[in-house]
Image: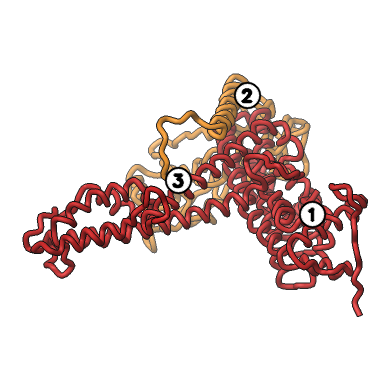
Amino acid sequence: MLSALLNSIQATLGTRGFIVSSVFPVAMFAIANGLLATRVWPSAQDWITALDAGDKTLLATAGLAAVLVASYILSALASAILETFEGRHWPVTWLRGPLHRVQLAKLRDLERRYTDCVIDLDQVAVRIDGDRRARPVVHSWLDILAEARRAGQRHDPARCQYPRDGIAEMRPIRKRRESGREIAHDQLASAVVSLLPWLWANAADGAAPHGSPARALDTDYDRLIEAMYYARDRYQAERIRLYNLRKFNYPVDAGARREQSSITLAPTALGNISRTMRSYAQNYYGFDLDVLWTRLQNVLRSSEPYFSNLQDAKVQLDFFAACAWLAWLTTFVWLAMELLVVRSVRGFIAVGIVGPLVAMASYALACRAYSVFADVMRTGVDLFRFKVLSELHLPLPAGLEEERIAWSHLANAMGYLNLESADGSAVSVTYKHGA
Amino acid sequence: MARRSGIRRPGPRTVFWIGVVGVWAVCLAAGGVWIRYHPQTAPAAHPPPVQGCLTAAEKQDMRGFIARRALAVNHLVRPDDVDWSQPAAGAQQDDLLSRYVTCAVAAGERAIAGETAPRATIATPSGQVSLPFPLDGNPAAAAAINAGWTIDVFNGTTAVVRSAAVLAVECRSGTTVDCAAIVAVAPDDAPRLAAANPSTARIVITTKP
């Protein structure tokens, strides 16, 4: 539903949108198919060469007209193509079960990685700062190491026994730090435990000559502390990345919740990204994008820079979706041609390998473009939703709870002609007219 | 993130993709086998070659096109050699185009499919040797010269060979690119011609059929 409505953005784009999102893909694939055809049938090239200037002009004009007509048809099919990739039409619906299973597995995997990351971050952060309220008390690694270092200062730095190339437990930490990989809590704990006796029994000295054991001990002490901070920041960055990945690629959690919702997991990645727009507006503000999109779009147009951004994102999405669709179409047509007409094993295998690769790459780029578009849409909901209320002569809500109730009532009244809310109370919409 | 479990069973995602790639590979293999056992039948377009060379009157109602210019034996038929607008007996361009004429045809006479062959038959004149000379460095010459012509080849201002007879022009299969002229030269000239750089040598056409 929303995908079809979103097509109205493109309708307002005019020539530029039509050229980029429809003519370019059709022209690209027409040229690619033409080159393939002349390779398979060299006589076609000779036939074109044999044409006189007038016939060549006629042929070029006819080709251009065919590309324009095909582009217009493609433009009209844009929303249907997008819906197909979202998993709403055949042939994707034929594979709905296995595809849904894959999406659910990906989501569960993402949630598991996120949970693991949060646990790892918590473990590292707690051990860096310590927790005196915990039972048993968690001592800070920094304090323990500093205490041991202070105790070691009683010894003579010149008699330090620390290995010049450091202890074995520090090597993986050094390697992982240098290569920018995460450092696990266990590895840090192991290094702390191994370094402590050395710090107790030897004097670490940063001013000692380069290559001396005291200097090496001091370097590893500093390096370990720096690695702890790095590990914490790395987990924090990863946690945020995984959170965003989950929220911006999936409309729901893997496990269903107690609250009633009409949003479920889609069978394809593109379908799930599409549903994140709805789920975001619904979950945060109670804003039903299906019902209120056309009203919101009207308001979005009031901001020329924002609406231009939205259109650009939509054009990119349509371009890559069209490329993916044309790539699949080209693949199947040429497979049939190779099988029934040309009958070249090499050509058949080449089309069977290259075609799906191009189609999958285009689909992956379409997913990225849709992520950008969905993000711009979410921003639009954040920034312009109150303007919708103003335009409808409705009062602005005082807080988030009131806002959710207001949108719910409005969607019931406008979208579903239902004047009774879920709890049985009457839907109340009070106007506020300007002066 | 840093959790590592032992050997894990492949998840639904891995199973799905292995399944998809496997099914696709099986389909491709099946298609490949089917094509191998059902090869393209040779087009019945080219009629059998006629015995000997026919007169203009005998060729009157035979499958072919009117020649725009004289075509020598082993002439490689190019788009502008015949008038494609007047096919006789349902002739197709493929009957003549990129094929070699086996009998000389006068200008205005009908060139027929039966007097063509997919390959040139090189007959080297006695006392001479034939060798190929690539025409890639001379695109204008490559587009023009054909069997029956004589050419001079120059390296700068120095003549490499003079009045070498072109026996045929051979191109990469099914195309009009990567062509070489098969020329007949005196045995003494052959080493010089073989050593000449085709990309810098200049070709001068001296006579046409």
Mark 3 crowdedness (10 Å alpha carbons): few <14, some 14-19, many ≥20: some
Q: Is residue B124 left or right of residue A371?
A: left
In the rendered image, which residue does mark 2 sit on?
A: B51
Q: Which mark is residue B166?
A: none
Label 1 chain ID:
A
- Name the colour assigned to chain B in the rendering: orange
- Name the colour assigned to chain A in the rendering: red
Helix, strand or loop at disc 1? loop
Amino acid on which the number 3 mark rests in the picture: Met
**Are dots 1 and 3 on a single chain?**
no
Label 2 chain ID:
B
In the rendered image, which residue does mark 3 sit on?
A: B1
Residue A285: quadrant of the picture: bottom right
Indicate which disc, 2 or 3, sits on the residue closer to the N terminus: 3
Q: Is residue A216 left or right of residue B119?
A: left
Helix, strand or loop at disc 3? loop
